[in-house]
Amino acid sequence: MKLGLGLYRHQLDDDHFRFAAQAGCEALVIHLVDYFNQGGVNTAKDQPTGDLAGWGRAGDPDKLWEEDYLRDVVKRAGAHGLKIAAIENFDPAHWSDVLLDGPRKAQHLENVKTIIRRMGAAGIPCMGYNFSLAGVAGRVRGTFARGGAEAVGMDGPVDDPVPEGMVWNMRLGERVGPGLMPPCTPGELWRRLEDFLHAVLPVAEASGVVLAAHPDDPPMPTIRSTPRLVYQPQLYQKLIDLSPSPANRLEYCLGSLAEMTEGDLYAHTENYARQGRIGYVHFRNVTGKVPTYKETFVDDGDIDMLRIVRILHRNNFQGVIIPDHAPQMTCAAPWHAGMAFALGYMRAALQTVAKETVSTTT
Ligand SMILES: [Mn+2]
């Protein structure tokens, strides 16, 4: 198991690479979608939340991430001893009609395949994705965490419909509406996911890349009147069972899983780790469950995080764990302090379980 850090696109520079290396990271998970582009209420200082207007404007539909750009990031991070373990999230501009089953679906599936091939060529072995129409919508921000630290949570369901022209909480064009996103049933959304996996997994396998699915965030059966796929822990098994390909994996978000109303998180983690289906782990903690939960400091929520690390270790999980999100700490560098706090805890947990194994085998 390796320690990693997630970085947003605007953070892919030497200072952030040094910060990760100094905290003991061996790997990075990078975001290439600019969530903050022309957004109304978000700043790039923390994870995006946003109101009903969404996060910001999606990227250029005609400009896929270039192989040279990917190679450059791999090289610059490598100079600090860091591997790029994964890219997290496709740009809605590149694959919106895969989600919507729209008229450019064939082209958008080709876009995804092209991106996967370029990742393979650049040596980036995992693509994290979130197969969702509404995306990460409906969350609020406040001083919810210990000591009044700013964090993110949910305060009741949000079912205001998604306007036409918005997908995955981002605007595809200059403006949205006045129409609405076409309706979709849960069965239809599962069929779209299956189409995606069957089209892309063979290319992923040939490219040495795995796909890793994030569960729904927040994990409600509907958000903004759109269906969701993985909003209870056992629904991850349904996703796994869509394809036996070893490239069909999970972006295992402990926070989202703990926010779900059913299931034993430890038993599910044991089950998915034993199947070898975890791509990488979002290591974050929460208190409460949907529709009312709050993100917490990693040591301060409902999940026994050390117990999770023991389960992953016992099942020989070789992938990366990253903090996902962390509360913002009151100081000159709130994001950095929050991440450093989480990384320190995680590094201690990894060292603790490694020593436990030694002590039981000698
Ligand atoms: Mn997550």
Image (cartoon, helix red, strand yellow):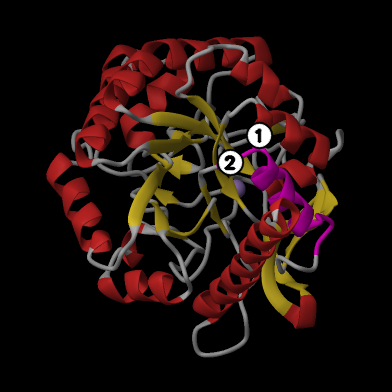
Residue lying at 55% horizontally and 31% vertically, measured from the top left:
132
- Range covered by the magenta-colored residues: 301-317
Q: Is residue 56 left or right of residue 154?
A: left
Q: Tell me which numbered mark, 1 or 2, is placed earlier along the sequence.
A: 1
Residue 94 shown left or right of residue 122 in the figure: right
CB contact under 8 Å: marks 1 and 2: yes
158 w.r.t. 235: above or below: below
Q: Quadrant of the C terminus?
A: bottom right
Q: Position of residue 108 (x, y in %)?
A: 31, 21
Residue 273, labelled with which disc? 1
Residue 202: give x, y in percent of width and height: 35, 14
Cβ of mark 1 under 8 A from ligand 1? no
| Residue with the mark numbered 2 | 317
Magenta stretch contains residue 305: yes
Taking the magenta stretch, the answer to whether it contains residue 209 is no
In this view, which residue lies farthest toward the left?
A: 68
Q: CA distance from mark 1 to mark 2?
A: 7 Å
